[in-house]
Image (cartoon, rainbow, N blue to C red):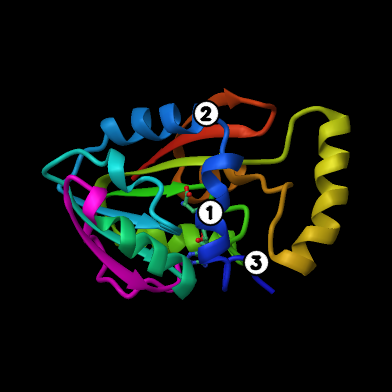
Amino acid sequence: MNIYKKAGPVYARLERHLEPASWKHWRQTMLRALEGPEVLEVGVGTGANLPYYPRGIRLTAVDSSASMLAKAADRVRQCPCSVQLYHADVEQLPFDANRFDAVVSTCVFCSVSRPRQALLEIRRVLKPGGCLHMIEHVEPQSLLGRLAARAASLVTGPLLGEYFNRRTGELLQEVFGRLEDEYLGQAVFHRYRAFL
Ligand SMILES: C[S@@+](CC[C@H](N)C(=O)[O-])C[C@H]1O[C@@H](n2cnc3c(N)ncnc32)[C@H](O)[C@@H]1O
């Protein structure tokens, strides 16, 4: 079960109320630093990042949920750069190796079924010297936080395909080797930059 499969219309209505104000700043700061021109966004969702891409980027964006992608299509006009949307799974990307200068992912690895496979695919399509830019929520550091995240995920994982105990930083370190990890706040949010 994946909560996002048919969630597009509801998610698009709720996100502006649910998303903490800091997210807009985090998205802008991350995307301003992008080096293209060829950029892939995985799990584009309803297209919340689209207004913040710099001009001159050629953006390819994928999502495995057709209903989320339909909402992203409504937002393409707000994007200052060119955008191509694809219905595709990050675990099996329909692109040649070494195609992209940068890959972007925000709040996606909490719901990807096989995160290691997804990172291997991202590494495959990145050019040598390319960079994966991520903002994700991960397992908290404190013992109490870890226990709460694990308990919640026992329910939300099987029921909704959503996990609060992902150790995305550790996985990035294993798959990419070179990593910058910036703690953003609220116990769970991190910004990562992984380099090839
Ligand atoms: C919480 S939403 C985040 C959407 C967007 N990145 C944002 O920042 O608002 C997670 C998105 O990841 C997508 N997703 C989950 N697993 C995926 C996969 N294996 N391949 C592609 N997209 C996936 C979901 O369909 C959903 O649109």
Residue 75 seen in this snapshot: yes
Residue occupied by mark 2: 21
> Is 85 in the magenta?
yes
Q: Which mark is residue 61?
A: none
Q: Position of residue 141 (x, y in %)?
A: 75, 29
Label 1: how many residues lie within 10 Å, few (<14), some (14-19) or many (20+)? few
- Amino acid type of the residue that numbered disc 3 sits on in the rendered structure: Ile
3D distance between C-alphas at marks 2 and 3: 23 Å
Classify residue 60 as left or right of residue 112.
left
Q: Position of residue 156 (x, y in %)?
A: 78, 59
Q: Which mark is residue 3?
A: 3
Mark 2 CB in 8 Å range of ligand 1? no
3D distance between C-alphas at marks 2 and 1: 16 Å
Q: Nearer the viewer, residue 159 or 17?
A: 17
Q: Nearer the viewer, mark 2 or mark 1?
A: 1
State which tag comes first along the sequence, 2 or 1. Answer: 1
- Amino acid type of the residue that numbered disc 2 sits on in the rendered structure: Ala
Q: Main SS type for the magenta part?
A: loop
What kind of element bears circle 3? loop
Q: Nearer the viewer, mark 3 or mark 1?
A: 1
What kind of element bears circle 2? loop
Q: With respect to residue 183, does 44 lie above or below?
A: below
Q: Which mark is residue 13?
A: 1
Q: Position of residue 123 (x, y in %)?
A: 38, 56
The tally of labels here is 3
**Residue found at x 40% / y 58%:** 42
